[in-house]
Amino acid sequence: MPSLNRTRIDRDAERSGVWKDYAKARGIRVQVARWGNPEHTELLKELSLARQPEIQALNDAKRAAEAAGLPAPSHEDEGVLREINAEAMAKTLLKDWSGVTETDDADSPEVPYHWEAAYASFMDRELPFYDDMLELTMAEATFRKNAADTARGN
């Protein structure tokens, strides 16, 4: 009979992070913390407050478009929200990476993890990295006790 124990969440891993293979790029591993952990929530609040006028302008534009029966601002127009989320993710959720290089050449050196490099990757709309890391950091399964115990040792 199945036990609920296999659904336990490792609360420490949610904050400190777990190592996972990046499925879309062989040889790349990422250490991620859980979306919404206290450090992440605090930084999101801080970044959002600092950019409140831009967020308000975007919300006003959405309401005005809706009232006029026009299309809402496009995804690109919501750049401020992506910038805020990307910075918060790069500083608090993506803790480290390995196997990331500048090019696909075999002799290309590894790019050491730094939040600014992660931010640049998140802001590159031709890369699925932002969406993939959103999904990974929000997925409960990423932080299940058994999976986190195994991943922490790698």
Image (spheres, rainbow, N blue to C red):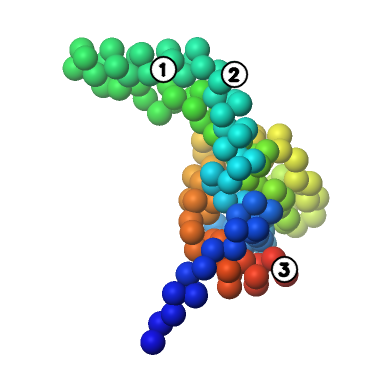
Q: In the rendering, at what x and y percent does residue 131 appear? A: 49, 45
Name the residue carrying label 1. Answer: 58
Please say if the residues under marks 3 and 2 sit with CB atoms less than 8 Å apart. Answer: no
Q: Amino acid at mark 3?
A: Asn
Decide which of tag 3 and tag 1 comes sooner along the chain.
1
Q: Is residue 75 left or right of residue 150?
A: left
Return the residue at label 3.
154
Q: Where is residue 4, by image quadrant?
A: bottom left
Task: Kindly state the secondary structure of the residue where label 2 is placed.
Answer: helix
Give me the disc on residue 124: none
Q: Nearer the viewer, residue 75 or 15?
A: 15
Q: Is residue 94 above or below residue 106?
A: above
Front: mark 2 or 1: 2
**C-alpha span from label 3 to label 1:** 43 Å
Q: Nearer the viewer, mark 3 or mark 2?
A: 2
**Disc 2: which residue:** 50
Distance from disc 2 to disc 1, alpha carbons, whole Å, reads: 15 Å
- Counting residues from the N terminus, which is met first, the one under dot 2 or under dot 1? 2
Q: Quadrant of residue 153?
A: bottom right
**Label 3 SS:** loop
Q: In x, y percent, where is residue 118? A: 66, 40
